[in-house]
Image (tube, rainbow, N blue to C red):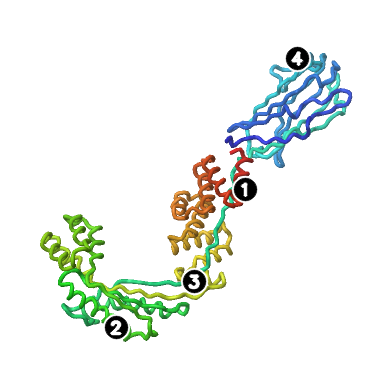
Amino acid sequence: MNAYKLIITAAAAAAAISTGAYTKPAVSGSGTRVERSESSLIVNLAVNLADFSNQTNREVILTPVIKSSTDSLVLQPIIVAGRTRYYRHLRNDSNPAPYTLLRSNRTDTADYTQVVDYAPWMETSELILRYSVEGCCGDNLGENGSTLLATLDFAPRVFVSTYIYVKPEAEAVKTRSVSGSAFIDFKIGKTVIDPDYRNNPRELAEIRASIDEVKSDKDVTITSLSVVGYASPDGSYAGNERLAKGRTQSLVDYVNNLYHFPAGIMHTAWHAEDWEGLVAYLRSSSIENKDAIIELAADNSLAPDTREARLKSRFPKQYAFLLENVFPSLRHSDYKIDFNVRAYVSTEEIAAVMASAPQKLSLEELFRYARSLDENSPEFREVMEVAVRMFPDSPVANLNAASTAVAHGEFDLARAYLAKAGNSPQATYINALLLIQDTQDYPAARALLRTAADAGVAEATAALQQLDDLGF
């Protein structure tokens, strides 16, 4: 659409002048046309010469003026003269004359066009026609005045988006967890933990730090602490099962000796051989004969000892590499601490928790805090980004983040969020806003807006009406 589309409001059905006995209505509002190019303003008037007095020694001087609240520009006058005055001007005035000369006592309509340099102050202004009547010697006969021909509005026609945000459902109980893997070193064939052996001081310190951080938080209640032990696939399955079970229990005993949890908090399990971990490593590796080794390692129809024997015999070089570099990492104990977090009520409290431990907040609490902020503020935007970071798979979090991204012109980011926002009517609406603002694909946007409007999104109905009003 032309960004300089003109909106003209005629002052009356016939914007005209009246000069008593000398003139009749002279310039028709329907003949007024003002247009803008990139750097010029074009003013067109239609002057009906039959409407002027035919007295030979009279003339009417019409002066178009563009006027705003701060500036004005006088355009070249129009002189509509009787016969005697008309020929006097032709004889005595310069050529070209600084006016447009027309003769009255004619039945046709004359077109008047002026092109002037466009200035920003003209964006919202008025076109006014001043008039005066002079006699045979250039005397002003006291019949002066002005009339409004048109109001001008060259402001760009811009679609104004209304962004929507969906309120998430509150969590009945906020359940959170922290987890990790401990690589406790055991002496060959042993299941008892030596706290000072090899890397054990560091690994045990990490476990204690995880438990201490949760246990010392007055806002949380621990509901479960689970430990799952794994052994590597090398050696006999029976021996590995004994090691996995015994070493898991040793870690649980270590924790129980340091902390006093209520009955039922601790949970244990073990896996004799971590074939799944081996397959996961192989998939990301570039080891020779990768596909064949993966096929063998993932073949659950084979007994574990058979799998290991075939791996060792068919791929001796690769097996030696895995034994030295990969199998040690498959001897691990995974731990997980589950806990409940209390609810936060005030927005001030939510803001403080977001700054220090955002993982303790629910999506609804983050949304409640966001709604207390100005939608255009950096703080509002930050909350939406925290929400989608804490809840990356939530359609609501992604939808709200997408709405904020579109509002700030971050269209690639908005598309990434919308890809995870689901197919709700609200998501359809935000997709339509993205099309309008990013690609100006109005037909596609209209189709999405109709779908959203039919589903009850009032903002989509309003957007369709706005597109109609703007001519998009």
Identify the secondary structure beneath mark 4. Answer: helix
Residue placed under numbered mark 2 in the picture:
254
* Residue 147 in the image, given as x and y percentages of width and height: 79, 33
> Which amino acid type is shown beneath numbered disc 1?
Ala
Farthest residue toward the right? 21
Label 4 neighbour load within 10 Å: few <14, some 14-19, many 20+ = few
Side of 298 relative to 442 (left or right): left
Q: Is residue 219 above or below residue 375?
A: below
Left or right of 35 on screen, residue 145: right
Secondary structure beneath dot 2 equals: helix
Q: Quadrant of residue 190?
A: bottom left
Kindly indicate whether the residue at mark 2 contacts the one at mark 3 (C-beta within 8 angstroms).
no
Q: Residue 90 has which mark?
A: 4
Using the image, determine if residue 447 lies above or below residue 193.
Answer: above
> In the rendered view, would you say 207 is above or below 107?
below
Considering depth in this image, is 162 or 356 the residue closer to the camera? 162
* Residue 353, disc: 3
Please state which amino acid type lies under the numbered disc 2: Tyr
Question: Viewer-nearest of labels 1 and 3?
Answer: 1
Name the residue type under label 4.
Answer: Leu
Separation of residues labelled 1 and 3 (CA atoms): 38 Å
Near mark 3 (Cα within 10 A), the count class, few <14, some 14-19 or many ≥20, is some
Label 1: few (<14), some (14–19) or many (≥20) C-alpha neighbours in 10 Å = some
3D distance between C-alphas at marks 3 and 2: 32 Å
Judge depth for marks 1 and 4 and give the one in front. 1
Mark 4 or mark 3: name the one nearer the start of the chain.
4
Q: Earlier in the sequence, mark 2 or mark 1?
A: 2
